[in-house]
Amino acid sequence: MMRVLAVGGFSSALALVAALVVLGRRPGSRIPSLGAVCGRVMSYEVGPVPVGRIGLLGFWWWVGWHFLAR
């Protein structure tokens, strides 16, 4: 039962992200595209520390650890 809930939760999150990507690509949309969001995150710095890049690296590490390490 818990596996079904987990798969359903991740599937709904993936569907939400896909919907936001489609809505962000429309002309005149107020929702930023995925590329614009990634560019903004990658450019975020606090002094000389690239906080956005470190955060993105941590996110990909988490994804790899939880989904690709088996």
Image (cartoon, rainbow, N blue to C red):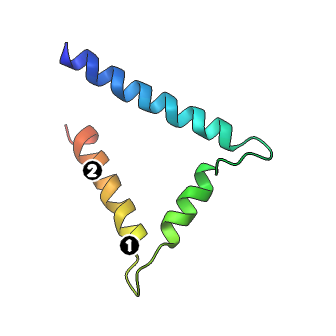
Relative side of 26 to 33, left or right: right
Instruction: Identify which amino acid the numbered label 1 is placed on.
Output: Val
Circle on res. 17 = none
Q: Which residue is mark 1?
A: 51
Instruction: Identify which amino acid the numbered label 2 is placed on.
Output: Trp
Relative side of 20 to 42, left or right: right
Q: Residue furthest right?
A: 27
Relative side of 38 to 4, left or right: right
Q: Is residue 26 above or below residue 47?
A: above
Q: Which residue is mark 2?
A: 62
Q: Nearer the viewer, mark 2 or mark 1?
A: 1
Q: Quadrant of the N terminus?
A: top left
Secondary structure under tag 1 reads helix
Q: Residue at horizontal 42%, vertical 68%?
A: 52
Q: Residue furthest front?
A: 30
Q: Is residue 55 above or below residue 11?
A: below
- Residue 20, given in percent of the width and then of the height, sits at 59, 38
Q: Residue at horizontal 49%, vertical 64%?
A: 41
- Residue 66, given in percent of the width and then of the height, sits at 23, 41
Mark 2 or mark 1, earlier in chain:
1
Q: Quadrant of the C terminus?
A: top left
Secondary structure under tag 2 reads helix
